[in-house]
Image (cartoon, rainbow, N blue to C red):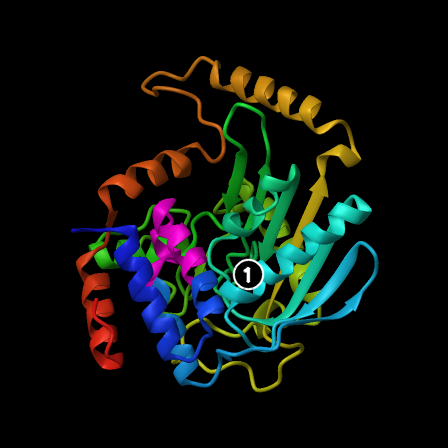
């Protein structure tokens, strides 16, 4: 069944208000969360709402954080999220990166003491309206085994880059550094389907197609799946995200990153504070005139779109195309939710007195 953007946004606002968020923060968080559903990243949208609420119930999310800059230079800053919703902390930090870029040409912000921040692409895209290139990264719960490892030491650690164009839609790359994000595994679990080979290994380090492989002590795999298919590159990319987001800011990194699920406790001996993010904003005219650059981006996009597709494929896509096309559709026909998600949100609403 499909639900309108307005209905889901209103429900999310109601729930966030119930856990103590200010109206302004609730709107910001709901905007970020629902952007995932609109863009087809269903694993990071309202399906995650109950997860945030459970973390709040465990005292691991501060609904009224004092988000602040704790260190800065003209072009850089470190932000302390005060344990707040990453959905609120991240837009604050990205705004600082943009403001610094307006003055210095580029702005770079690393964040500590935060929580899960939704989809990486949302934050990177905030730079587009300013004729800037946006970059967004975050580390995450350790569910990923480095190449040749049985241990889970990294998160899905996404990278997003948003680049403005002139008449063409922007280039927006938003990807996990694993073969598949954990959220996709959760969706397959709800559908009762297996995973493709290359997504998961079991507790002994062997390939598996079981969606419960991670729950049973296994791990997600870096982008590439195995060494022969380039998993060492996915491992390196995930490591870069972890270091930029956390080692640089003072957040927890590697296996010390707090788990998103409330039933698992954070490490009793943390190496930092909360989850870490990293944001960048680069003013295009710090490199060349913005109109000139955007005209050439149009040319770049147009040429790649004109590439001859391989047999059985309709066209060559530009990063951001599927999400943009789906957003236009879902704003018209609504957002589909799986039955288990509807059940979960209905029960959540009943518990807090918010009608779903």
Question: Residue 320 location in percent, x, y?
Answer: 47, 36
Residue 341 part of the magenta-drawn span: no
Query: Of 162 and 195, which appears nearest the observer?
Result: 162
| Relative horizontal placement of residue 143, taking residue 296 as reference (left or right) | left
Q: Of helix, strand and loop, which mostly describes the magenta segment? A: helix
Q: Quadrant of residue 251?
A: bottom right
Asked if residue 182 shows in the view, the reply is yes
| Relative horizontal placement of residue 132, taking residue 147 as reference (left or right) | right
**Relative height, residue 354 to residue 76 (above, below):** below
Question: Residue 337 location in percent, x, y?
Answer: 23, 54
Query: Of 288 and 302, which appears nearest the observer?
Result: 288
Question: Residue 243 location in percent, x, y?
Answer: 68, 60
**Relative height, residue 120 to residue 304 (above, below):** below
Asked if residue 212 shows in the view, the reply is no
Neighbour class for label 1 at 10 Å: few (<14), some, many (≥20)?
Answer: few
- Magenta residues (range): 30-47
Instruction: Please state, as top left, top right, bottom left or bottom right, where the C terminus lies in the image.
Output: bottom left
Q: Quadrant of residue 242?
A: bottom right
Identify the residue under disc 1.
149
Question: Residue 340 location in percent, x, y?
Answer: 20, 63
Residue at 48%, 67% (x, y): give it: 24
Residue at 68%, 50% (x, y): give it: 98
Query: Of 194 and 15, which appears nearest the observer?
Result: 15
Residue 41 part of the magenta-drawn span: yes
| Relative horizontal placement of residue 139, taking residue 264 as reference (left or right) | right
């Amino acid at each position: 069944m499909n639900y309108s953007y307005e209905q889901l946004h209103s429900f999310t606002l109601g729930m966030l208000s119930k856990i103590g968020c200010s109206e302004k923060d609730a709107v910001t968080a709901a905007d970020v969360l629902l952007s995932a559903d609109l863009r087809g990243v269903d694993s990071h949208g309202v399906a995650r709402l109950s997860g945030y609420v459970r973390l709040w119930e465990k005292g691991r999310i501060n609904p009224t954080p004092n988000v602040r800059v704790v260190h800065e230079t003209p072009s850089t800053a470190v932000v302390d999220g005060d344990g707040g919703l990453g959905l609120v902390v991240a837009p604050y930090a990205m705004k600082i990166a943009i403001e610094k870029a307006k003055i210095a040409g580029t702005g770079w912000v690393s964040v500590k003491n935060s929580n899960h921040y939704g989809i990486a692409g949302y934050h990177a895209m905030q730079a587009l309206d300013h004729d800037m290139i946006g970059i967004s990264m975050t580390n995450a719960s350790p569910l990923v085994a480095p190449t040749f490892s049985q241990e889970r030491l990294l998160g899905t650690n996404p990278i997003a880059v948003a680049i403005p164009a002139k008449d063409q839609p922007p280039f927006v790359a938003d990807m996990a550094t694993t073969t598949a994000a954990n959220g996709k595994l959760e969706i397959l679990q709800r559908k009762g389907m297996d995973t493709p080979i290359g997504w998961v290994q079991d507790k002994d380090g062997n390939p598996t197609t079981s969606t419960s492989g991670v729950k049973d002590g296994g791990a997600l795999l870096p982008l590439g799946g195995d060494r022969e298919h380039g998993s060492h590159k996915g491992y390196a990319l995930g490591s870069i995200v972890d270091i930029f987001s956390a080692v640089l800011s003072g957040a927890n990194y590697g296996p010390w990153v707090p788990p998103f699920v409330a039933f698992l406790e954070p490490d009793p001996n943390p190496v930092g504070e909360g989850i870490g993010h990293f944001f960048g904003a680069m003013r295009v005219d710090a490199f060349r005139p913005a109109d000139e650059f955007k005209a050439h981006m149009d040319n770049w996009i147009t040429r790649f779109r004109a590439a001859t597709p391989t047999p059985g494929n309709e066209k060559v896509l530009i990063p951001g195309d599927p999400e943009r096309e789906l957003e236009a559709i879902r704003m018209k026909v609504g957002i589909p939710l799986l039955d288990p998600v509807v059940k979960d949100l209905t029960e959540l609403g009943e518990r807090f007195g918010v009608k779903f």
